[in-house]
Amino acid sequence: MVRPKLGICAFAPSLEAMAGAAADADAAGFDSVFTSELYNRSATITLAAVAMRTSRCEVASGIIYGVGRSPLMLAAEARDLDELSGGRFVLGIGNGTRRMISDWHGQDGSGPASRLEELVPLLRRIWRLHEGPIDHEGRFYKLRIRALDDLASAPGRNIPIYGAGLAPRMIEASGRVADGLLGHTLFSPRYIREVARPALERGAVHAGRDPADVALATYTLAVASHDEEQARREAAAMIAFYGSVKSYGQLFDVCGFAAEAKAMQAAFAARDVDAMVGAVTDAMIDEFACAGTPAQVAAALRRYHGVADHVVLSPPSFRVSPGRIAENLALLTEHCAPG
């Protein structure tokens, strides 16, 4: 079985801690360092800090909210990050759920897959503005611009673009227009085989592309501790965090945990976090996480050999103290680095 490329999400409570974790991962031999964003962090700023502290690994957004920026500014930020990193940047774009699109960003929440299919080619066209003016009137984006002669130049290379997706139609969108898919933290090998890989291939074939040209990358929930039970408890809390969201219901259904997902959603509605976490079973932890001692985590990662092209270790962030976040990152870096 072919070992996938291995990355790590440098999630930590501060910019300095994230940059330090990225530097450690780069020195340890990881193939990539990813950063993410929510309502309290900007992926672009953290990536700039990461780029300055690394020299070899890819630096990637996992994810940047495409819906939260205009295509023009997203293209400019990606270009700057690629230059800052010396051509090591991978642009991972996501939209979040329909409700996040409408409630968080004030945008039209319909058609998130169609939105991605419009955005990705438009970004590439902006990077080729030297070829001529853009007059784009689409469903989600409107852009009219021409370059000044002294600013009309392309980036130093074709910046890779990965689309985030969980539901089949969203995954198909990446197969149609992107260089790769970035799967959700709870993408298990079973979900990849039964849902993600076929959907990605359908999207590529629909667009007349070779499926082999579209990479499948995924986050995986990774929790290491010298106390195995502590690691599993922390994994359960993160699974419950995601399980409370109805949008992720299909993922749990496919993997045989529909009843557990409903129990987590009911506990969330009752604001009973303990019950929400308590609904997570040992079988769910084994399905959705690589959790336990450092050696157990390293062994569990072998489940992805031959299944994904790129696996990114994703530390939990729900009900985890800053000290444990740092400890987990250090253990994952020390014990799970490639080779």
Image (tube, grey):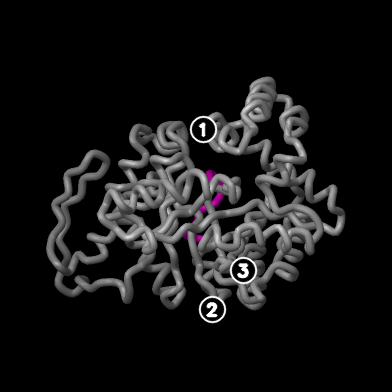
User: Horizontal placement of 271 versus 107: left or right?
Assistant: right
User: Horizontal placement of 149 versus 257: left or right?
Assistant: left
Q: Amino acid at mark 1?
A: Ser
Closer-to-camera residue (233/272): 233
Mark 2: few/some/many CA within 10 Å (<14, 14-19, 20+): some
In the rendered image, is residue 15 in sight?
A: no
User: Horizontal placement of 72 versus 15: left or right?
Assistant: left
Q: Dot 1 lies on which element?
A: helix
Closer-to-camera residue (228/10): 228
Give the number of the disc on residue 22.
Answer: 3
Q: Position of residue 125 (x, y in %)?
A: 23, 60
Q: Which residues are magenta?
A: 38-45
Q: Relative to 114, is 310 above or below?
A: below
Q: Dot 2 lies on which element?
A: loop
Q: Quadrant of residue 141?
A: top left
Closer-to-camera residue (190/144): 190
Q: Which residue is mark 1?
A: 247
Q: Which residue is mark 2?
A: 56
Mark 3 vs 1: CB contact within 8 A: no
Instruction: Give the residue displayed 19% in from the left and 71% down from the top.
Output: 152
Where is the C terminus found, in terms of image quarters?
Answer: bottom right
Dominant secondary structure of the residues highlighted in magenta in the image: loop
Is residue 39 within the magenta segment?
yes
